[in-house]
Image (spheres, grey):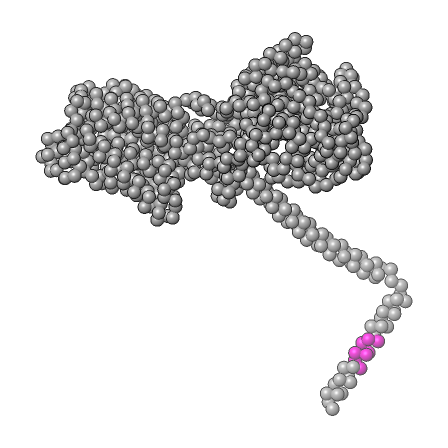
Amino acid sequence: MRIPPFRSQGSIRLDRKKSAAGLPIEPLGPSTLMAYSLRQRQGHIAVPRVAPGDHVFRGTVIAGGRSALDPPIHASTSGTVMACLEAPFAHPQGRSALTLEIASDGLDQATPPLPPLSIRDLDRTGLIRRLHEAGIVGLGGGAFPAALKAAQEIPLHTLIVNGVECEPYVSGDDQLMRERAQEILEGADMFAHVLGIKNILVAIDEHLLDAMTAIHEALKAFPQERFKVSKVEGRYPGGGERQLIERLIGTQVPSGEMPQTIGVICQNVGTLLSLGRAITQGEILTSRVLTVGGESIRTPKNLEVRLGTPIQDVIRYCGGLLAPNALLWHGGPMMGFEIKDSLSPVTPGTHAILAFEAPAPHPLPEPCIRCGACNDACPAYLLPEALYRASRSAQLETLRTLHVGDCIECGACNVVCPSHLPLIETFLLGKEKLGRLSEERERAHHARQRYEARISRLERQEMERERARLERKVALEKNSTPKILEAIERARRKQQAINTTLLKERSDDDLL
Amino acid sequence: MNPLSIARRPRSPFIRSERSVRDIMRDVLMALVPGALVALWLYGSGVVFQIGLAAASALITEAALLALRGRPVRATLQDHSALLTGILLGLSLPPLAPWWVPVTGAFLAMTFGKQVYGGLGQNPFNPAMVGYAMLIISFPREMTLWSGTFGDSPSFSTSLTALLTSPDESWWDSIARATPLTLLHDGLKTTMAKGLPLPDPALTASILINLAYLTGGCFLVFRQALDYRIPLAMLIVLLAGHMTLQTFGGGLLGSLQQLFLGSTMLGAFFIATDPVTAANTPRGRWVYGAGIGAFTLLIRSYGNYPDGIAFAVLLMNFAAPSLDALTRPKAYGHS
């Protein structure tokens, strides 16, 4: 690791290991058994729209698609729905989710593509509908529905094309830019055109020279004044959306807001490519480009893989593992996580599948010596060291004032920590506790509101009853006929007489 | 929550810092070598005695206290932090101080400077300077007698005599020499101010040793084992402040010489930069270093002690938590 004498604030320099760099993208055909996890963002489960036994084509909607928040899930090859069951999927905690399993029929027949759209008469609504129908989601790792991203009606001035692949080992975007620069730029051009965006900034990591050449070459066919290519310093996390915006535009995205609030929208190169194809060719998103790499993969590759392919099959295609007990990893080494079950399917968020030598235990944490390396590394300008202390002692208010919620969990602080402290994990716990606290407060607030509402309701009912009683009384007195009044008077007198008699009898008894 | 159980699972980020606390401490120890060698050459074998005794006392005290606190002894000692504290203290002591000075100093440093607060990372004050301050207050005579200078170091037997026996005043008078800073300080206290003639060999010695520490310090900056902000701010303030004082007729010596007197470079690169007790935010570190520079200059010029580094560091240690609170960086997306 190169150690420059001065730290620069907000990023770190990582070893640029790229085991599959420069290797052409190979297509990988469908597996015999494909699996589609129905779990969407934020734990929402898409509703299945096929049943076991149904026949599907590549591009058939098999689940979801009922609302903008619920993008459709498409089958990525033709075949028969076998089952709808709980199955593992790539998740940091190794959870399982409702999954549709489809046995491929080997024919790989597709549904007819959606009608191609003409860019001339495509408006925002049309674009959003198409992105939704084609199932386009962010392919940078977040899998955020592209339709949702385009839906906010805020005037935008800049589209940032994110070609900053800052994690080690990952080279899919690099390769996409080298091979399909034209299509990426077309997608960007169309997206910007429909949303009325004036400037397109193509941001590329300074180390990706071939990608840069390819983009420059492809740009010759586009209006020069709309496009600008920016070389971004190859530091981590340079490709983080907020970090990239600050670096390129010079403005920070307000905490808790989307970049659109400052007129900027960011799209990953792969997303723009599939977005462009969805518009011009009506192509549905059924595959994605990903990197298979790491020291324990026999032949690292950049692959175009059908969504739903079991990770195991992808690895097998790359010659398998060099060590039987290799550690499988989903995503980049910085922000990814361990794959607990290699049967988990490839999802739109799977931008890399890595394998490393047997999980070397992380060094044991030592006491924090407050060296401050983390404070200099944090791209959100937080104080990880102070956050760590506050998290460990569960000082939730301090965590809040230190803005733990703005931690992007990039792991830069973990990498520089000489004490090998589990910083991000601790912050996650802190965030969770803080979330629980505000949840509890919310609940307490609701309970209090409910209680107060009940009290006032009871009071109101009581008052209404009282008023009704009074009204009845008044009405009775007003409307009563003399006959009734006489009857009441008679009854009263009779009662009095009885009482008098009783009294007399009692006093007689006493006398006796 | 048990941090150990989390730490042993493979987790992101998969990449980890290749260096540990121990590596940083080892870098600092290595960076002290040039300074220690020059000191040995100038002040004789007494330097080795002081370093050895202080280090041994620091290690033994740390081990004993760790055992008392029920903490792992062997693993903790291997982080080299106790060794470093002992050596730093030993280097700050007069080479001819009697044996109980380094022993007591290191004991106090490790006990009241470090372990009572919970060990490494928990102490608010620089342990070596806690020990040094306690010594200079308790034993002012032993702590201000220096001997040896450029080309005239005390012999082995003289050093050993001073270490083991308690020689009387007349013996001391025959060999002790005041340091340049003490001379200047006393000169200022009496009548002379500017332009005081300094014995050249003493000044040369002081400059040599400071250059050696500066070299080690630069090595540490390059290795990122310390935060360059602290020494840089301290030296800038020391220099600028001194030049200001000189303009108004209060300063001593030439400006550059001020940087190479006493323990300036040892203090700037090895004492003030103790990360545990320094301010922690990036901006806070600039202020922290500047504060040490200012206090050093003030104590040197107007205080009772010829060299003010130890007290300047301890004073800024007090200020560090407040500095952290006042200089917190603005988090991303918060205006």
Name above or below for residue A276 compared with residue B267: above
The spot of residue B302 in percent (x, y) is 25, 29
Residue A450 vs residue B77, the one in the foreground:
B77
Q: Residue at x 66, y 35 (%)?
A: A344
Can residue A243 be seen by looking at this rendering? no
Q: Residue at x 48, y 28 (%)?
A: A377
Q: Main secondary structure of the magenta part?
A: helix
| For residue B197, side relative to residue A307 (left or right) | left
Question: In the orientation shown, which residue stands out farthest toward the left?
Answer: B170
Residue A399 vs residue B295, the one in the foreground:
A399
The spot of residue B205 in percent (x, y) is 21, 23
State how many labels appear: 0
| For residue A40, side relative to residue A489 (left or right) | left
Rendering quarter of residue A269: top right
The spot of residue A335 in percent (x, y) is 57, 31
Rendering quarter of residue B263: top left
| For residue B314, side relative to residue A315 (left or right) | left
Q: Residue at x 29, y 34 (%)?
A: B87
The spot of residue A81 in percent (x, y) is 78, 35
Residue B159 vs residue A357, the one in the foreground:
A357
Q: Residue at x 55, y 31 (%)?
A: A356
Q: Please say whether residue B246 is one of the residues in the magenta stretch.
A: no
Q: Which residues are magenta?
A: A494-501
Residue A322 vs residue A309, the one in the foreground:
A322
Name above or below for residue B241 compared with residue B168: above
Name above or below for residue A28 compared with residue A457: above
Q: Quadrant of the C terminus of chain A?
A: bottom right
